[in-house]
Amino acid sequence: MFQGSLTESILRRAQDKELVEIRVHDLRSWTHDRHHVVDDVPYGGGAGMVLKPEPVFEAVEALTRGPESTVVALTPQGIPFGQRLAVELARLPHLIMVCGRYEGFDDRIPQGLRALELSIGDYVLTGGELPALVVLDALVRLIPGVLGDETSAQADSFATGLLEHPHYTRPPVFRGMAVPPVLLTGDHQAIARWRRKQALRRTRERRPDLLAAMILSNQDRDLLAEVEADEAADGDGAA
């Protein structure tokens, strides 16, 4: 499950440049029975299988590099993963990500390992492998030198607290849809103002919860007032 993502695009280039080292370990390597069992039925009954504590503890203890290691457990019961947390985790020297499976972990695993429990969303997946890849991708692109343009990550959606502004490229007109004229002017100040206004507009429309949590500058308030005025004018025109 990991091989494809780790050998393509940004994740591969980051490893080729030796900016990050990513290793995948099989929990079965830390089992001691002939069948290499890593899970068992839950106490108290119920469907599914639960990851046993013994192989997980042995694996983490074998991989730990002392105080510089942070254990992360991928589970739908964890705290929501977002951009601010990605920035914090990207600064840490060594992460050990433990992927749950089926019914998840024996609860003594995150408790005993003092793991940071992370969730990538309010839905259930078969295991923690895909969430681990999502977290990895989000972290690696924040490491200095990974992206070709260091400003890319700074302008991404959520990096500033807002959704990102719309993007356009050639041709200037496609099937009757034109690129906003300001982007063709070469006026960098006007373009920056337009982009900020559009980011505010898009966030207001699609993620008002993000906007409500922000401390807005006076300029942002003025731009939002323009957005509201534009919407009112559009509504009058439609009427």
Image (tube, rainbow, N blue to C red):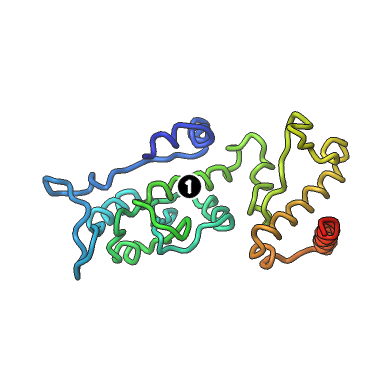
Residue 233 percent coordinates (x, y): 86, 58
Q: Which of the 4 quarters of the picture holds residue 124? A: bottom left
Residue farthest to the front, as pictured: 239
- Could one spot residue 141 in this view of the protein? yes
Residue 65 percent coordinates (x, y): 38, 50
Residue 225 percent coordinates (x, y): 83, 63
Establish if 199 lies above or below 168: below
> Crowding near pointer 1: few (<14 within 10 Å), some, many (20+)?
some
Amino acid found under the numbered disc labelled 1: Val
Question: Horizontally, is 13 left or right of 157 in the view?
Answer: left
Establish if 96 lies above or below 168: below
Residue 2 percent coordinates (x, y): 39, 39
Q: Residue at x 69, y 57 (%)?
A: 203
- Could one spot residue 219 in this view of the protein? no
Q: Nearer the viewer, residue 105 or 230?
A: 230
Q: Residue at x 75, y 29 (%)?
A: 171
Residue farthest to the bottom, as pictured: 44
Q: Which of the 4 quarters of the picture holds residue 158? A: bottom right
Residue at label 1? 134
Say which element carries label 1: helix
Question: Horizontally, is 6 left or right of 141 in the view?
Answer: left
Q: Residue at x 47, y 64 (%)?
A: 79
Q: Nearer the viewer, residue 100 or 146?
A: 100
Residue farthest to the left, as pictured: 34
Q: Which of the 4 quarters of the picture holds residue 84? A: bottom right
The image quadrant where one finds the N terminus is top left
Question: Horizontally, is 101 left or right of 215 in the view?
Answer: left
Q: Residue at x 42, y 53 (%)?
A: 69
The image quadrant where one finds the C terminus is bottom right
Count of residue discs: 1
